[in-house]
Amino acid sequence: GNSVTQMEGPVTLSEEAFLTINCTYTATGYPSLFWYVQYPGEGLQLLLKATKADDKGSNKGFEATYRKETTSFHLEKGSVQVSDSAVYFCALTDSSYKLIFGSGTRLLVRP
Amino acid sequence: DADVTQTPRNRITKTGKRIMLECSQTKGHDRMYWYRQDPGLGLRLIYYSFDVKDINKGEISDGYSVSRQAQAKFSLSLESAIPNQTALYFCATSAELGKSSTGELFFGEGSRLTVL
């Protein structure tokens, strides 16, 4: 079945460091891929998305490229800020268009 | 006001009690979902509804039931709560694919339930 695997956290970085959070997926067909972010005490909100192979989603300095050949959708940011501290979820749509989430990766950015 | 509103935001109850979590939305979406979040397990789908007359079980529906009272309202019930149902519960909505949507979900702020 369809599934999403994320790197385990927590990921702890200093401010202005480079961020990569790995995400790989297993799916039939051509799912859309998403990154959601959950700030403390809040619900999830969409960070970025990509709907077909080689698409790059970007938002707030974050980027992720849909790589069909490696079934990956890694999240990157060139210079993280303390305000980026949150839990990040990778997700895909299944054949009936429901979202399947990874287990989440907590990011902690220190000043 | 939030587009997706959940009530209550926090609830502590005892084993065996009946609990209802309510969700209402102003986004005009047909599709609504209930997810459960547990540490290290991400979000798991409990039930979903693609329109008012449609109810479907998700991957962890045992011990839960739902009611879609209207397009804008989708409630989750625990008929007899047990401690391992202690979790953070999220309601979400989405537009039907093809209506300028790629399946993006819009989430409420969550309902934290503790079962003692």
Image (tube, coloured by chain):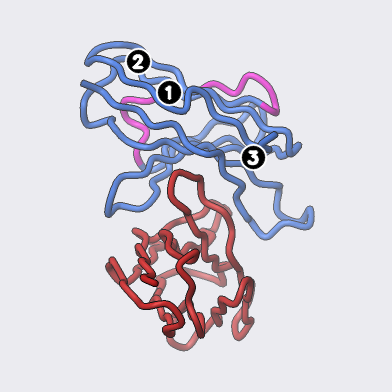
**CA separation, marks 2 and 3?**
24 Å
**Residue at the disc numbered 3:** B31
Q: Is residue B12 above or below residue A75?
A: above
Which chain does the blue colour mark? B
Could you tell me which chain the residue with mark 2 belongs to?
Answer: B
Highlighted magenta segment, given as a residue range: B60-72
- Residue at the far front: name it: A111
Q: Nearer the viewer, residue B73 or A21?
A: A21
**Quarter of the figure with the C terminus of chain A:** bottom left
Q: Are both tags, 2 and 1, on one chain? A: yes
- Residue B82 on image: x %, y %: 23, 22
Whether B66 is among the magenta residues is yes
Q: In which image quadrant can residue B115 be found?
A: top left
Q: CB under 8 Å between callouts 2 and 1?
A: yes
**Residue at the disc numbered 2:** B79
Which chain does the red colour mark? A
- Residue B52 on image: x %, y %: 66, 27
Residue found 28% across the figure and 66% down from its top: A10
Q: Residues within 10 Å of mark 2 (few under 14, many from 20)?
A: some
Residue found 50% across the figure and 82% down from its top: A79
Callout 3: helix, strand or loop?
strand
Q: Earlier in the sequence, mark 2 or mark 1?
A: 1
Q: Earlier in the sequence, mark 3 or mark 1?
A: 3
Q: Is residue B26 above or below residue A68?
A: above
Three-letter residue code for mark 1: Ser
Q: Is residue B40 above or below residue B114?
A: below
Could you tell me which chain the residue with mark 1 belongs to?
Answer: B
Q: In which image quadrant can residue B24 be found?
A: top right
Callout 2: helix, strand or loop?
loop
**Residue at the disc numbered 1:** B65
**CA separation, marks 2 and 1?**
8 Å
